[in-house]
Image (tube, coloured by chain):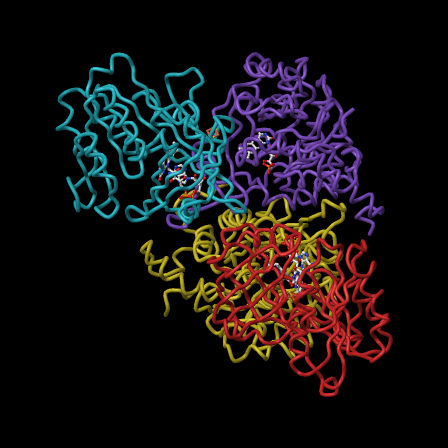
Chain colours: A cyan, B purple, C yellow, D red
């Protein structure tokens, strides 16, 4: 847990409003767990105070380079999208607890399900799982073909099923509509996306084991301000903090 | 004695900087980032009698040069704080200012009784200004008779000096300050957040689960400076200033206005190292303006203008 | 009828945008930048009975996402305004909202009598919230009985609808709004500036000649939104919303909170074209959210939540 | 009077904290009167709302290039100093009334007196006067040699006398200490600097005619907000607005 000043090596629009930002610096060496996030400052001298939590999408340890994929939607991410190569980005991280593999998960197949801007962390996770010999299948849900990204790259790791809401690419519908056909081998499920999608995934998963990565608006990003709590019935306190206890939780651990 | 040393009732501080309540948890998270013993002190998160879960999420929203929060005083309750949280701060050996909240006078009194008896707690901060809970909080803080009554009762049971944390959401901050001074407060903390709100223009819905929240950050600093300036001329209590401080320059501005110590809230989220960085910067600024001891800064502005504001 | 049309007592506006009082002079300066006839209306600078020179300089200071001003109601007096300033606005054929100030009830009454009798003036805005003058202004605006009395007397002589401009520097904005509603106000303008201050950390001296000033700009928008939201649920008067608006999105946010029209102040200094640019942008945003007429936006948030805030 | 988006062509530190910024764009064509100023926006997405008034220091109409010289002292000018070539600066202008020559001024010599950051507009003014055949002498006051700038360039236009407070360059003292020796020909005086300096210049000038350019904190910059007033006994209103009635006034016209 450190503050790093990273150098932008590239920041390009890879799909409608979706940017791929590559950052380099010594701090990258610590970013080795998929599912962790960086708390990113969007501007100096700026009126935007709060950092933006963005998932680690890929890390190249040799080049000391971390990749973030983000949607420029609000003012902060739009500012971020203006940064060009050579500029500095101030990040905290890696933060949170990423995806971990329990011992008995090692022999099983994995099904990685991501919706929209929940997709990025699955890339780094997929690479990790594959390197451990686990067979990986992805279900990636987008609004439409214009919003889709990184499909080729996911395909290099494992079978990649795409859904779009408008049917312009892959299966028309939601990620859950594509789940049934790929659950026969009882894969471990890893899912990232909006709460409503995670809830649907959890239901559709039946009794399968898996991990969910949650989103919530954050203040500190490190567990101090209690902005990002989520109710749970599995802990005495009655809540978890998404930034520091999560963002990854076991399926069933929190109340969605 | 260091040139940054300041001394307030119950708070013997090696520098005037302490994190503000609610923005620093109970310290343990930031202890992973730096050695808390560099701080002048620490204000811990509000304690209530029972544990509270707080408000629905989202609990924060961003505004221009500020943020809204509606945490809702989530905390594990005074007992657990005394058992688990406060002891963990022992190694840092810094004064602890314990923030107290409640829904009723009785709750405030009981929490004060318990927490002020901890030998580790240096002083208590009476939070009568939380805008994010339905009962207690700000309702005590906007009526000066209720504020004075509560102060008196809490003082009666407290084993430690009592700072009353004032709400800026009032017509007359001086009247409030005078009321709690008369009721026996040992010091003032000011300001808490301004009540604010943000809507999503697309849906018309409030961003915060609680709808309204407390506005903090640099946006509110001018309001804080003005209130501290005015109050410091009319009461003789020491003031812990806060509201939008994020640089060493801000600290000196706030002390000039009348603060004896300065708490840093929202800025911790922008930069977790902000407190130690400010502390390091302060002596350089003092050199720049040729001031030896930082305690000379307090109320410099009003000293300079000599006559109190109100008689001008 | 255009989809941006809104109608308030005395103010038949082709769009909800008007410059805020004091930020646009009497219009002639901005008329050099664009054709003022595109505006929904114009609020002119405060008029007092006699000319006033105002406060010592510096009169403005910059703060984070905001600014402080202490102009001190400088104006040539109501007579000269009627003779020289208002006639110059004739060609633009837009509603004129005339801001009125005074040191005494009598002054407010006399200014209203004179200015409201001009056939060019559509409505008057009672400024009981100026923080920058020693007498009158905010002192009427922070005591609800004085505010109600003044409103009643001004209403009695005014030939045009009366909007009362509320101060945010109060403990209970709803109480103020209800008091002036009962006293016969035709509408509300809110909010005026928050009282603030800035010191030069090097010298400890206030930046402003008047020491304190009024805080405006995006920094205060969350306070404005909250107050408009709360008040719109408790009074049935139309509200001219203002405070930190600088984009078309801000306008829709403020209307969602409960405003029927929106005034733009500080943003004119940032970008002299801000009002026409907002007006141009509004239909695009309405398209984006599928709303036909902008008047449907008013109070959308509270409509959605159905029950008034206070009973939740 | 227009809003222009100008392109930074260069922005370099020419003395301690003093920056020379060159901007280009079609708007420059209108900036032909010395003494006028631009109201400069220091940042977008920034928490600094107010524009900074900066004098026109030089204009090259052929290249459509305007030069500003400014001291990076507060937050806003520091932000401005970060801009690099190719970036956009949003300015209003030209604003205010510049220096004008009365008919009977044409045969006389001119003495141009500037203190610190009041120096820049005298450069463009000096060039104009010289092109009209008027003999120009400058007195330029700086804190010390490290703060001095543009002396060579001024020397190309006319005799340039320098004063520094610490005596590290030229005459030790203030600009007024250098005035006596160059007032024999009863020159027209043009002076720009802080009010306290202008007051001293006015006193020292005795009965000589001249023009002063004033400074004050501004809001709108165009005469609408009444932030920048200065008392006068020569107008019925009792005040002038520095941004729109000035910044240049006849000596004696306003109460300093
Ligand atoms: C653990 C985690 C990982 C994430 N990873 C990614 C990622 O890899 N790529 C990506 O594009 N997005 C990711 N998000 C969502 C991303 O944080 C938001 O889209 C982003 O903060 C929105 O900022 P903005 O400037 O666009 O919006 P604004 O509306 O300007 O944001 C205002 C405030 O609200 C917060 N906010 C708004 N929407 C969200 C949201 N959906 N989640 C959390 N905070 C929000 C912002 O952080 C900021 O504090 C992640 C969120 C979390 C919690
Ligand atoms: C007509 C005119 C022409 C000027 N020409 C030049 C020039 O060519 N070069 C130059 O370096 N400076 C010039 N100045 C002064 C310049 O405007 C200020 O130095 C600058 O605004 C300070 O901004 P800052 O960001 O450094 O300070 P900050 O302290 O961040 O400024 C805060 C606010 O105060 C205002 N302010 C602070 N100091 C001054 C001041 N001395 N005068 C006016 N406003 C001030 C700023 O504009 C801003 O609104 C001129 C001023 C005027 C009125
Ligand atoms: C997330 C958050 C939580 C807060 N919780 C508390 C609290 O529990 N008790 C309290 O007295 N003040 C609380 N405050 C108010 C701060 O202590 C402080 O008074 C205020 O934020 C102004 O300072 P700042 O602008 O530096 O943040 C909280 C503020 C924030 C931003
Ligand atoms: C320079 C300045 C002068 C003002 N003068 C007046 C005034 O004469 N009368 C008045 O009712 N409000 C005055 N106001 C307040 C504005 O009309 C408005 O209520 C306030 O600035 C909030 O809006 P904003 O954030 O858009 O500026 C003034 C504000 C500014 C910045
Ligand atoms: S964001 Fe502060 S506790 Fe999670
Ligand atoms: S700056 Fe607004 S009138 Fe001069």
Determine whether C52 is above or below B81 in the image. Answer: below
User: Is residue B207 found left or right of D202 in the rendered image?
Assistant: left
Q: Nearer the viewer, residue D228 or C167?
A: D228
Residue C129: in sight, yes or no?
A: no
Foreground pick, C160 / D146? D146
Residue at x 27%, y 26% (from the top left corner): A190
State left or right for residue B171 relative to residue C30. Answer: right
- Residue A183 is situated, as x and y percent measured from the top left of the image, at 16, 24
Q: Is residue C188 left or right of residue C143?
A: left
Q: Nearer the viewer, residue A113 or D237?
A: A113
| Image coordinates for residue C135, horizontal then vertical, percent | 75, 58
D64, above or below C64, in the image:
below
Picture quarter with ligand 6: bottom right
Q: Residue at x 73, y 36 (%)?
A: B259
Quadrant (top left, top right, bottom left, bottom right) of the C terminus of chain A: top left
| Above or below B70: residue C95 | below
Residue C42, x across and y down, in percent: 54, 68
Q: Is A65 drawn above or below residue C31 in the view shown?
A: above
Residue drawn at point x = 65 percent, y = 27 percent: B126
């Amino acid at each position: 847990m450190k503050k790093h000043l990273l150098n932008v090596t590239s920041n390009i629009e890879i799909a409608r409003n979706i940017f791929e930002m590559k950052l380099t610096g010594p701090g990258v060496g610590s970013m080795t767990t998929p599912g962790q996030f960086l708390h990113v400052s969007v501007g100096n001298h700026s009126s935007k105070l709060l950092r933006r939590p963005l998932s680690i999408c890929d890390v190249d340890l040799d080049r000391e380079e971390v990749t973030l994929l983000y949607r420029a939607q609000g003012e902060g991410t739009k500012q971020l999208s203006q940064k060009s190569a050579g500029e500095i980005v101030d990040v905290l991280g890696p933060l949170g607890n990423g995806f971990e593999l329990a011992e008995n998960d090692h022999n099983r197949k994995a099904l990685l399900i991501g919706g929209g801007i929940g997709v990025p962390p699955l890339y780094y996770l997929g690479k990790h799982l594959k390197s451990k010999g686990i067979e990986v299948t992805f279900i990636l849900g987008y609004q439409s073909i214009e919003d889709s990204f990184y499909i080729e790259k996911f395909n290099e790791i494992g079978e990649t099923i795409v859904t779009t809401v408008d049917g312009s690419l892959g299966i028309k519908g939601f990620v859950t509509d594509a789940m049934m056909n790929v659950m026969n081998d009882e894969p471990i499920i890893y899912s990232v996306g909006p709460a409503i999608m995670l809830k649907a995934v959890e239901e559709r998963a039946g009794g399968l084991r898996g991990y969910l990565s949650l989103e919530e608006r954050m203040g500190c990003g490190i567990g101090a301000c209690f902005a990002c709590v989520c109710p749970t019935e599995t802990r005495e306190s009655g809540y978890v903090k998404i930034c520091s206890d999560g963002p990854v939780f076991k399926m069933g651990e929190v109340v969605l | 004695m260091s040139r940054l040393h300041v001394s307030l009732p119950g708070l013997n501080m090696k520098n005037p900087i302490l994190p503000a309540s609610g923005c620093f948890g109970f310290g343990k998270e930031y202890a992973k980032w730096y050695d808390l013993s560099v701080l002048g002190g620490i204000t811990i998160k509000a304690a209530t009698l029972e544990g509270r879960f707080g408000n629905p999420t989202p609990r924060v929203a961003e505004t221009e040069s500020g943020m809204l929060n509606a945490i809702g005083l989530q905390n594990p309750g005074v007992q657990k704080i005394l058992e688990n949280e406060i002891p963990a701060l022992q190694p840092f050996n810094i004064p602890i200012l314990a923030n107290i909240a409640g829904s009723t006078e009785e709750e405030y009194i009981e929490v004060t009784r318990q927490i002020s008896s901890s030998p580790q707690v240096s002083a208590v901060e009476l939070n009568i200004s939380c805008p994010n809970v339905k009962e207690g909080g700000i309702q005590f803080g906007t009526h000066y008779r209720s504020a004075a009554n509560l102060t008196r009762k809490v003082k009666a049971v407290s084993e430690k000096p009592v700072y009353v944390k004032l709400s800026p959401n009032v017509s007359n901050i001086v009247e409030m300050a005078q009321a709690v001074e008369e009721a026996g407060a040992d010091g003032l903390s000011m300001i808490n957040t301004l009540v604010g709100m943000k809507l999503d223009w697309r849906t018309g819905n409030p961003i915060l689960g609680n709808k309204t929240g407390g506005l903090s950050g640099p946006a509110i600093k001018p309001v804080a400076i003005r209130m501290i300036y005015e109050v410091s001329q009319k009461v003789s209590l020491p003031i812990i200033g806060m509201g939008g401080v994020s640089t060493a320059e801000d600290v000196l501005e706030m002390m000039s206005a009348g603060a004896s110590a300065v708490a840093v809230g929202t800025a911790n989220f922008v930069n977790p190292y902000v407190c130690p960085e400010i502390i390091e910067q302060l002596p350089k600024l003092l050199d720049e303006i040729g001031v030896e001891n930082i305690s000379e800064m307090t109320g410099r502005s009003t000293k300079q203008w000599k006559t109190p504001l109100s008689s001008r």
